[in-house]
Image (cartoon, rainbow, N blue to C red):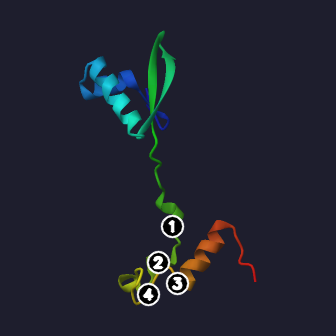
Amino acid sequence: MESENGILQCEMWKRLGLSSREGSRLAQRLEEKGEIERDRVLYEGRWTYKLNSKRRHVSLASIKDSPCLRCDDIDRCFEGGERSPISCEYLTRWIMENSGERRRG
């Protein structure tokens, strides 16, 4: 049982070829490192954990209209460079338009 919302810990053990003890230790270490969250769930009459990644997937769709992707100066654009994203009026305008904020005059 795997989904966008995680994988059952018992399924993880099977897929990785681990014993339940090894799988449990691995899940605990990942939780301690802040990589996953473990939620206790009842599955087929037994208690197990559902493992959910704390990493969020970023969609490239969110930046597809960025002016940087079609800028002729992209190779010279960096902090402290000839061009800079910090002072780029095109990037600033795009961020403001896409964040829903309006510049206050």
Tell me the element at label 2: helix
Q: Quadrant of residue 46?
A: top left
> Please, which residue is most extreme toward the right here?
105
Where 12 sits versus 55, above or below?
Answer: above
Tell me the element at label 4: loop
Q: CA distance from mark 3 to mark 1?
A: 16 Å
Residue at image x 42%, y 40%? 34
Residue 83 x %, y %: 43, 87
- Amino acid, disc 3: Cys
In the image, which disc is placed on residue 68? 2
In the image, which disc is placed on residue 88? 3
**Could you tell which of marks 2 and 3 lies nearer the N-terminus?**
2
- Amino acid, disc 1: Ile
Contact, mark 2 vs mark 1 (Cβ under 8 Å): yes
- Amino acid, disc 2: Cys
In the image, which disc is placed on residue 63? 1
**Could you tell which of marks 3 and 1 lies nearer the N-terminus?**
1
- Amino acid, disc 4: Arg
**Could you tell which of marks 2 and 4 lies nearer the N-terminus?**
2
Residue 77 x %, y %: 40, 83
In the image, which disc is placed on residue 83? 4
Contact, mark 2 vs mark 3 (Cβ under 8 Å): no
> Given this view, does label 3 or label 1 mark the residue nearer the observer?
3
Residue at image x 59%, y 76%? 94
Q: Residues within 10 Å of mark 4 (few under 14, many from 20)?
A: some
